[in-house]
Image: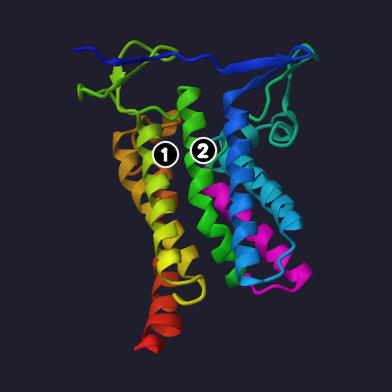
């Protein structure tokens, strides 16, 4: 069977010897695109959010949370084993036994940590600038699936977070990994997150940000995304060796509380704030 052989160039071009990679570009498109979406919602509803400051808070919160989340959830045995390893959480270098060092970049980002970091950053933003937390969460969550889609496309380019072996006609052979046909799990996630964004846009055009009750889009976003994440993990390779003997992998375990939180906000927004009052 002719499978899709996947081995794209990671780099787009170089600037003064510094490579510009697809992964970084897709991250930037996701963050900037989400910022533009929030700006449009902000202008339409005249909420007067400080969108530029909000972008910086989101940027730092997501990246810091995703990095720390990866190191704690997936690599604690390494990053907490010594002071030099601990510093690698924050500094993109590795100190060698010889005393030399090598540039490693921030290899390893966890989406669950990114969500936690984002929520904490938004709480701090609302505390400083005196905005309603749930309203800001809704506006950011409305745009978040677009950003998540871009990030998963970046994972696809990098041939990371790969699926399990399969013989389905659309299987990918990730040549950087091996020559085994596998589920393109990153593509599944990217397509689903795109659908979550489009359906959220449909709901928004049919109703309004506030008609559904505050907290609705936040609950909708994390409950749908992490429910799908829970199930797609069954056809993904584990990210770390310690997950091999676990009934549920780390991604599934971390998804469960986020699903519950999302469903709670859906319930309270629809039946306490929105739907029950609209009857």
| Majority SS type along the magenta span | helix
Q: Is 186 in front, or is 85? A: 186
Q: Report the magenta residues as a range.
A: 111-133
| Residue at the image position 72 percent from the left and 54 percent from the top | 57
| Residue 258 seen in the figure | no
Quadrant in which residue 271 is drawn: bottom left
Q: Residue at x 67, y 45 (%)?
A: 64
Q: Which residue is mark 2?
A: 150
Q: Is residue 230 visible?
A: yes
Q: Give the image's coloring scheme.
A: rainbow
Q: Quadrant of the C terminus?
A: bottom left
Above-or-below relation of 45 to 160: below
Mark 1 residue crowding within 10 angstroms, few (<14) / some (14–19) / many (20+) = many
Helix, strand or loop at label 2? It is helix
Q: Nearer the viewer, residue 176 or 38?
A: 38
Position in image of residue 9 (x %, y %):
53, 14
Residue 172 image offset from top left, x and y in percent:
32, 20
- The reply, left or right, for residue 111 in relation to residue 40 is left
C-alpha separation, residue under disc 2 versus residue under disc 1: 7 Å
Image location of residue 63, percent across then percent down: 65, 43
- SS for tag 1? helix
224 over 10 or under it: above or below: below
Establish if 146 lies above or below 102.
below
* Residue 139: numbered disc: none
User: Which residue: 60% across, 17% down?
Assistant: 11
Residue 212 shown in magenta? no
Magenta includes 125?
yes
Q: Are the residues at dot 2 and dot 1 in contact (C-beta closer than 8 Å)?
A: yes
Specify the label residue 190 is tagged with: 1
**Mark 2 burial class by Cα count in 10 Å: few <14, some 14-19, many 20+:** many
Instruction: Work out whether mark 2 precedes mark 1 in sequence or the reverse, and give the earlier one.
Output: 2
Judge left or right: residue 252 versus residue 141: left
């Amino acid at each position: 069977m002719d499978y899709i052989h996947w081995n794209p160039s990671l780099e787009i071009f170089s600037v003064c010897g510094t490579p510009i990679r697809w992964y970084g570009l897709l991250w930037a498109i996701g963050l900037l695109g989400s910022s533009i979406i929030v700006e449009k919602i902000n202008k339409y509803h005249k909420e007067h959010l400080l969108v530029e400051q909000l972008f910086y808070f989101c940027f730092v919160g997501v990246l810091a949370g995703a990095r720390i989340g990866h190191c704690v959830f997936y690599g604690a045995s390494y990053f907490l084993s010594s002071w030099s390893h601990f510093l690698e959480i924050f500094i993109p270098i590795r100190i060698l036994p010889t005393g030399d060092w090598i540039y490693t970049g921030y290899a390893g980002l966890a989406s669950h940590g990114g969500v936690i970091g984002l929520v904490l950053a938004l709480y701090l933003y609302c505390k400083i600038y005196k905005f309603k937390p749930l309203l800001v969460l809704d506006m950011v969550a409305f745009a978040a699936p677009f950003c998540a889609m871009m990030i998963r496309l970046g994972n696809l380019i990098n041939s990371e977070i790969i699926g399990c072996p399969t013989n389905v006609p659309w299987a990918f052979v990730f040549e950087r990994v091996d020559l085994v046909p596998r589920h393109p799990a990153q593509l599944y996630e990217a397509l689903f997150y795109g659908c979550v964004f489009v359906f959220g846009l449909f709901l928004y055009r049919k109703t309004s940000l506030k008609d559904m009750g505050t907290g609705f889009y936040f609950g909708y976003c994390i409950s749908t995304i992490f429910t799908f994440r829970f199930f797609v993990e069954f056809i993904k390779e584990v990210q770390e060796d310690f997950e091999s003997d676990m009934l549920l992998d780390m991604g599934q375990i971390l998804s469960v509380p986020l699903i519950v939180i999302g469903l709670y906000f859906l319930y309270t927004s629809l039946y306490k704030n929105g739907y029950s009052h609209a009857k």
